């Protein structure tokens, strides 16, 4: 699979809320972070547990790929994200756009950074 195909498979797993499949595309040390900022989910296990918790709060959470581009070891997605109503009573999060930068080491994703 190309890096672009892998990143698209990650989004499909994310939308299915299949955290095990999602992290199977990542290196063991992979993380998710704000762009050039703080890590929000560290390692495969941190990503798994963090996403599982988020999906519990937002069971209708989805990310639609609006634009995709592969450049070397990077995949860039412009994503349209909808959360839907929460299960914990938190206020509704309006749909939003994000740029996600997927960095690859070999055939696995090593880092995802979000620009929002």
Image (tube, rainbow, N blue to C red):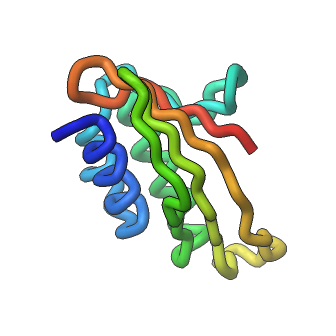
Q: How many marks?
A: 0
Judge by depth and name the residue closer to the eye, 11 or 54.
11
Q: Quadrant of the C terminus?
A: top right
Q: Residue furthest left?
A: 1
Judge by depth and name the residue closer to the eye, 2 or 90.
2
- Kindly indicate the quadrant of the structure image that contains residue 79: bottom right
Residue 100 placement, left or right of 95: left
Residue 75 placement, left or right of 3: right
Q: Is residue 49 above or below residue 39?
A: below
Q: Is residue 66 above or below residue 101?
A: below
Residue 106 placement, left or right of 8: left
Q: Position of residue 50 (x, y in %)?
A: 52, 46
What residue lies at 64% left-to-right and 71% top-to-bottom? 83
Judge by depth and name the residue closer to the eye, 47 or 101.
101
What residue lies at 52% left-to-right and 75% top-to-bottom? 59
- Residue 107 visible? The answer is yes
What residue lies at 57% left-to-right and 59% top-to-bottom? 54
- Residue 46 visible? The answer is no
What residue lies at 40% left-to-right and 56% top-to-bottom? 11
Q: Quadrant of the N terminus?
A: top left
Q: Is residue 20 above or below residue 115?
A: below
Residue 73 placement, left or right of 88: left
Judge by depth and name the residue closer to the eye, 58 or 79.
79
- Kindly indicate the quadrant of the structure image that contains residue 43: top left
Q: Position of residue 74 (x, y in %)?
A: 43, 27
């Amino acid at each position: 699979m190309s890096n672009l195909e892998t990143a698209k498979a990650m989004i499909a797993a994310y939308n299915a809320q299949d955290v095990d499949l999602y992290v199977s595309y990542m290196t063991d040390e992979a993380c998710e972070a704000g762009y050039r900022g703080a890590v929000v989910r560290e390692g495969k296990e941190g990503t798994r547990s963090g996403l599982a918790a988020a999906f519990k709060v937002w069971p209708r959470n989805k990310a639609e790929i609006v634009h995709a581009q592969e450049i070397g070891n990077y995949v860039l997605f412009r994503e349209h994200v909808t959360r839907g109503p929460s299960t914990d009573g938190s206020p509704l999060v309006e749909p939003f756009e994000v740029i996600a930068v997927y960095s690859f080491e070999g055939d696995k994703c090593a880092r995802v950074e979000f620009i929002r």
